[in-house]
Image (cartoon, rainbow, N blue to C red):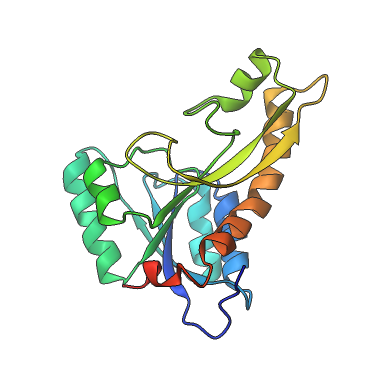
Amino acid sequence: MVMLIGYNKVRTAVFISGSGSNLKSLIKFSKTKNSPISINMIISNNSKAKGLNYGKTFKIKRKIFKFNKKRLVEEKLLFTLRKNQINMICLAGFMEILTKNFIKKFKGKILNIHPSLLPKYKGLNTHQRALNNNERYSGCTVHFVNQKLDSGKIIIQKKVKISKNETKVSLAKKILIQEHKLYPKAILKVFSLQRKNQFRS
């Protein structure tokens, strides 16, 4: 693994819908010397997302897009991203499915974190589904985004043991702690020296 010390950091947008805890961990990571990325924009589909407050705290530009007319909104979103020279996207609890056209425009440059050990439990309600099936382990996955839901190439995963009296709330908390550690590790893995040029405009 190669740390990109001395290189210009790749301008990155984080897409959120809620509390933004993964956003916060990515911002902190982005400010370390070894981080290959800078967080330059926060995008949300929810004007009441608590995570937008991190934009104020860390002085990061925030934009809200209502996905009522998806293709039209995505055109505006793409324009905004280009205007701000964004070359990478990290999805972090973003509750919208991006269209094939949008994903093509950022092919190989969109990452997502998902609270299960993919390919198991794609989509929503992952913790309860794992418990319903009496799984011994769950966890989280960072993967590239492609045109199928939660089906892109896996970058890295972290396994979490499910306790005897686990609830979906307690499991979610355990996995979230690991998510905060895993996303930065995944980004470092992606940005090996061989692949860094993929993220340059």
Across and down, in percent, residue 99 comes to 26, 41
- Residue 75: % across, % down: 19, 53
Q: Residue furthest left?
A: 72
Residue drawn at x 48%, y 55% is 52
Q: Which quadrant of the structure image shows residue 63?
A: bottom left
Query: Horizontal and vertical percent for residue 3?
Result: 60, 74
Camera-side residue: 179 or 77? 179
Image position of 167 with respect to 145: above or below: above
Q: Quadrant of the N terminus?
A: bottom right
Q: Is residue 164 left or right of residue 196?
A: right
Tell me where residue 139 appears, x and y as whole percent.
66, 36
Q: Residue at x 63, y 74 (%)?
A: 32
For image coordinates 42% across by 38% down, the residue present is: 95
Decide which of 51, 151 is in the foreground and name it.
151
Q: Is residue 108 left or right of residue 135?
A: left
How many tags in the picture? Answer: 0
Q: Is residue 138 left or right of residue 103?
A: right
Q: Is residue 68 above or below residue 50?
A: above
Spot the residue most to the bottom. 6
In the figure, residue 57 lies in which quadrant? bottom right
Q: Nearer the viewer, residue 141 or 56?
A: 141
Quarter of the rendering occupied by the C terminus: bottom left
Q: From this viewpoint, which residue is outermost toward the right? A: 164
Residue in the image at 68% along x and 54% along y: 181
Picture quadrant where residue 78 is located: bottom left
